[in-house]
Image: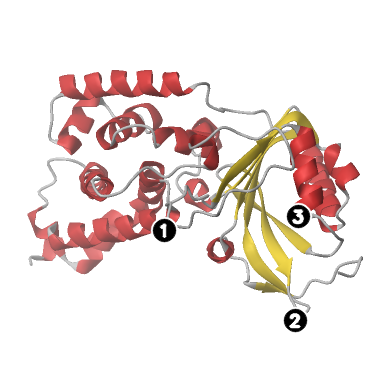
Amino acid sequence: MNAAHEVGDFEQLTSGYRTELLAYCYRMLGSIDEAEDLVQDTYIRAWRYFDRFEGRASVRTWLYKIATSACLTALQTRRRRPLPSGLRAPSEFADVPLAEAEPRIAWLQPAPDTILHATTGDPATVVSLRGTIRLAFIAALQHLSARQRAVLVLRDVLGWPASEVALMLDTSTTAVNSALRRARTQLASIGPIEADLGEPAEPQLQALLDRYVTAFEHADIAGLTTLLRADVELEMPPIPTWFTGRDAVCGFMGNMILTAPGLWHLVPTRANESPALAIYQHGADELYHAYGICTLTLIGGRIARIVVFADAELVTRFDLPEISTWRPTHPA
């Protein structure tokens, strides 16, 4: 290996792209765990062939080409990652029997906001990309073929020219443009996708979250009801059953989840450019153990969608502890 291709050169040239590649792979795969694995694989491949890199394309283009190839290969053996709303119709009644949990389904995963915020220091760019990291958009991408997904993300989200996308996919610009048209048509057939939902200003948002946390921890269904839109939705992967409508959501929570004060503890965080909460469940040892991550979608100052990912390991992915020593004001 010559002096131009030493370890220090490789790290200096490539390290600045790791986080944006992680966001790209997450959009492609819908899993932060798989995205991290593929980014690691991308850097291993790039290092392996670094002595062949001649600079005909930029380092960024070269890395995206490797990452795209890794994603397309991975998607050959993976089914799309759904949310419950992508599998069946909702229930409008609180007392329906819950379907059995489906741990064998590879469900869509939420992602900490840090995978996007570290991509760019430009606030305007962060705002423009916000809708492309929300759960609704990531879920919609799952309905596209792997190549359509790559073309749409590279062209419409990241703004790559068709000629460079063709280079990454070893195809023609004509084929890229054709795939992009099909991808856009497919997305349009799914229905409207949340974009900038106009979340309230920070003080109002914080006040609403505080009220939600207090109502949840105190099992205050009446207080919770005032925070929800009439058409609110509740999803709880890996349980396929999901609910729509304030009466159904609040009825289910009151009957099955919020049966007494002090059973749950919520810690605010951020996921997919939306407010989120880490959920801890009261245990026999009087401590609160990680249960999962809840994402909230707000429209018009009220909560329009609640997705509870019942996966304790997700909590640590958000740099939060597995166990909380929090003590409720209302004992469990």
The residue drawn where x is 40% and y is 42% is 27
Q: Secondary structure at mark 3?
A: helix
Q: Are marks 3 and 2 in contact (CB under 8 Å)?
A: no
Q: Is residue 228 above or below residue 41?
A: above
The residue drawn where x is 42% and y is 45% is 81
Amino acid at pointer 2 = Asp
Q: Which residue is mark 2?
A: 285
Q: Nearer the viewer, residue 202 or 137?
A: 137
The residue drawn where x is 16% and y is 19% is 174
Tell me: 112 left or right of 302.
left
Label whose residue precedes the other's in the sequence (3 or 2): 3
On residue 127, which mark appears? none
Amino acid at pointer 1 = Asp
| Residue 26 in sight | yes
Q: Nearer the viewer, residue 229 or 204?
A: 229
**Of labels 1 and 2, the one closer to you:** 2
Q: Which residue is mark 3?
A: 257
Tell me: 284 left or right of 65.
right
Label whose residue precedes the other's in the sequence (1 or 3): 1
On residue 33, which mark appears? 1
Q: Residue furthest bottom?
A: 285
Give the position of the N terminus as an image quadrant. Answer: bottom left
Label whose residue precedes the other's in the sequence (1 or 2): 1
Q: Nearer the viewer, residue 143 or 138?
A: 143
Q: CA distance from mark 1 to mark 3?
A: 28 Å
Residue 210 pos. (x, y %) = 82, 49
Amino acid at pointer 3 = Ile
Give the position of the C terminus as an image quadrant. Answer: bottom right
The residue drawn where x is 56% and y is 32% is 89
Colouring scheme applied when the structure was drawn: secondary structure
| Crowding near the residue tagged with mark 2, few <14, some 14–19, many ≥20 C-alpha atoms within 10 Å | few
Q: CA distance from mark 1 to mark 2?
A: 30 Å
